[in-house]
Amino acid sequence: MTHVGILTNDIEKSTDTIIKSFGGRLIRDLVDRDRKVKLALVKVQEIIIEFVQPLTSDSPVSNLLKRLGSGVYHVCFEVEDIDEKIEELEKRGFLVIEKPSSAAIFDGNKVAFLYHRALGIVEIVEKGGSK
């Protein structure tokens, strides 16, 4: 697992709270205009947490935040070949909810989001991204 994704409506407050509470450090933050989100990667002990805040009401995560509130909403795994892995996962009952595309937070490496009823939302990232 490369990281856990947490939805938030206040990325500064969320990152500040986790850093002060558990001794983490900010690795990277940026605005991803393509995905309409603000992102921050925080390392706490050996865990990477990706905080995700929608920038606009039509951001892909805005409705999730409204329905679920702040909290964990995905786990992410690194894969060698994203297209091959998606093909394999679809055979195992996963549904693609966002096709592979370049992700600024991972230095342009491709990411995709899938859903499985037993697991919820899973992100996969093609190897070579930021840690």
Image (cartoon, helix red, strand yellow):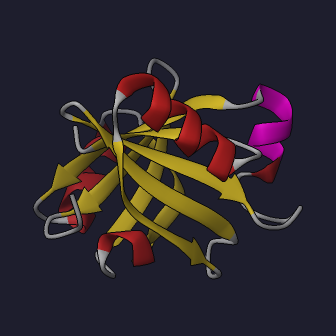
| Horizontal arrangement in the rendering, residue 98 relative to residue 33 (left or right) | left
Quarter of the image for residue 112 reads bottom left
Work out whether residue 110 can be spotted.
yes
Residue pictured at 32% horizontal, 70% vertical: 106
Residue pictured at 33% horizontal, 82% vertical: 108
Q: What span is in magenta?
A: 63-68
| Horizontal arrangement in the rendering, residue 48 relative to residue 117 (left or right) | left
| Horizontal arrangement in the rendering, residue 82 relative to residue 33 (left or right) | left
Residue in front for this viewpoint, 124 or 44: 44
Q: Is residue 12 above or below residue 23?
A: below
Does the magenta stretch mainly form a helix, a strand or a loop?
helix
| Horizontal arrangement in the rendering, residue 109 relative to residue 20 (left or right) | left
Where residue 58 appears, x then y in whole percent? 85, 65
Residue in front for this viewpoint, 33 or 110: 33
Residue farthest toward the top in the current orientation of the protein: 118
Does the magenta run of residues contain 14?
no
Residue pictured at 30% horizontal, 79% vertical: 107
Where residue 126 appears, x then y in whole percent? 22, 65
